[in-house]
Image (spheres, rainbow, N blue to C red):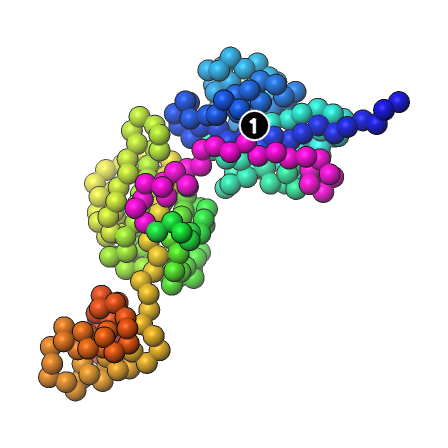
């Protein structure tokens, strides 16, 4: 008798809103596999019905994945092919699925990605913020202290930051960003991407807080936050402090001279001079 061959796990990206945002390959694979493991079978059935796909569904979500992974792995090792999908976007990206993929890798079962929609990347692409380096931070902690602690650790990051957020926590997150990142930090709030009421709000953290305080916030949200402004080199703050305290030159001229001497953008040196003022006021 020939040796049994394992099936394949397909990790399939599905639309984040608009049902047309799915690849031809994804539609074909969803129709050909033996089983589809879905985060919410009722939600996913709407997508499958739209494309006339009758493949059986089984649930695989954050609460049952540790147990379900073993069952699905057995099916795969028996030669069945399975597609893994989440409610929206790419599985395993702030969604369930990594435990199943890990189990497949450990067992030598093939896992194949079918690329497609991702809310985080979609929002980044229209943010107008630097995209050469970015960090995906998922959801911020729901509790105030934990959220503020997380933001504080990210305050000096020199890459663009990407967060998911819930509608009822958006204002709290923005208020914390205004306080910890500064009200002038540029950001994008992407709400209901690809859906009927899509909103892309670009502005400063303070402007975004004011905007979203005007009414009820609804829908799925992605926050794209600009990198922290570059910090002046060591010694610049001391030179600035001495000149501001002793020189009769106007601030603009002091900033110009220091920026030229240290080869720094004038805007960065100017911001550093304002921070010195704030520190002096705080120290009394």
User: Is residue 256 placed above or below 177 in the rendered structure?
Assistant: below
Question: Could one spot residue 230 in this view of the protein?
Answer: yes
Left or right: 227 in relation to 114? left
**Label 1 SS:** strand
Q: Position of residue 32 (x, y in %)?
A: 61, 18
What residue is rendered at 28% in x and 38% in y? 200
Residue that label 1 marks: 38
Question: Could one spot residue 172 in this view of the protein?
Answer: no
What residue is rendered at 63% in x and 21% in y? 33
What residue is rendered at 60% in x and 41% in y? 98
User: Is residue 242 placed above or below 213 in the rendered structure?
Assistant: below
In which image quadrant can residue 149 be found?
bottom left
Magenta run includes residue 123: yes
What residue is rendered at 64% in x and 35% in y? 111
Q: Which residue range is magenta in the image?
A: 103-129
Count of marks, rendered view:
1
Quarter placement of the C terminus: bottom left
Residue situated in front as seen by the camera: 137 or 158: 158
Of all residues, the one furthest to the bottom in this rendering is: 246
């Amino acid at each position: 008798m020939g040796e049994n061959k394992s099936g394949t796990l397909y990790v399939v990206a599905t639309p984040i809103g608009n049902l047309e945002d799915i690849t031809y390959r994804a539609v074909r694979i969803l129709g050909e596999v033996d089983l589809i493991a879905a985060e919410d079978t009722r939600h996913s059935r709407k997508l499958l019905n739209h494309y006339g796909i009758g493949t059986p569904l089984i649930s695989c979500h954050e609460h049952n994945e540790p147990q379900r992974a073993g069952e699905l792995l057995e099916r795969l090792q028996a030669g069945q092919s399975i597609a893994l999908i989440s409610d929206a976007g790419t599985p395993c990206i702030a969604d369930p699925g990594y435990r199943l993929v890990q189990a497949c890798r450990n067992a030598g079962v093939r896992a194949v990605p079918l690329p497609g929609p991702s809310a985080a990347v979609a929002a980044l692409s229209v943010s107008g913020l630097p995209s050469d380096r970015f960090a995906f931070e998922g959801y911020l902690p729901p509790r105030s202290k934990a959220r503020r602690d997380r933001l504080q650790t990210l305050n000096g990051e020199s890459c663009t930051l990407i967060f998911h957020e819930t509608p009822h926590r958006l204002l709290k997150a923005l208020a914390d960003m205004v306080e910890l990142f500064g009200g002038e930090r540029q950001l994008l709030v992407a709400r209901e991407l690809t859906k009927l009421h899509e909103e892309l709000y670009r502005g400063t953290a303070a402007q975004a807080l004011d905007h979203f305080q005007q009414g009820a916030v609804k829908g799925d949200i992605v926050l794209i936050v600009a990198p922290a402004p570059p910090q002046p080199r060591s010694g610049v703050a001391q030179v600035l402090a001495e000149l501001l305290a002793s020189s009769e030159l106007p601030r603009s001229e002091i900033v110009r001279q220091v920026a030229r001497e240290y080869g720094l953008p004038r805007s960065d040196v100017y911001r550093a001079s304002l921070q010195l003022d704030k520190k002096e006021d705080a120290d009394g």
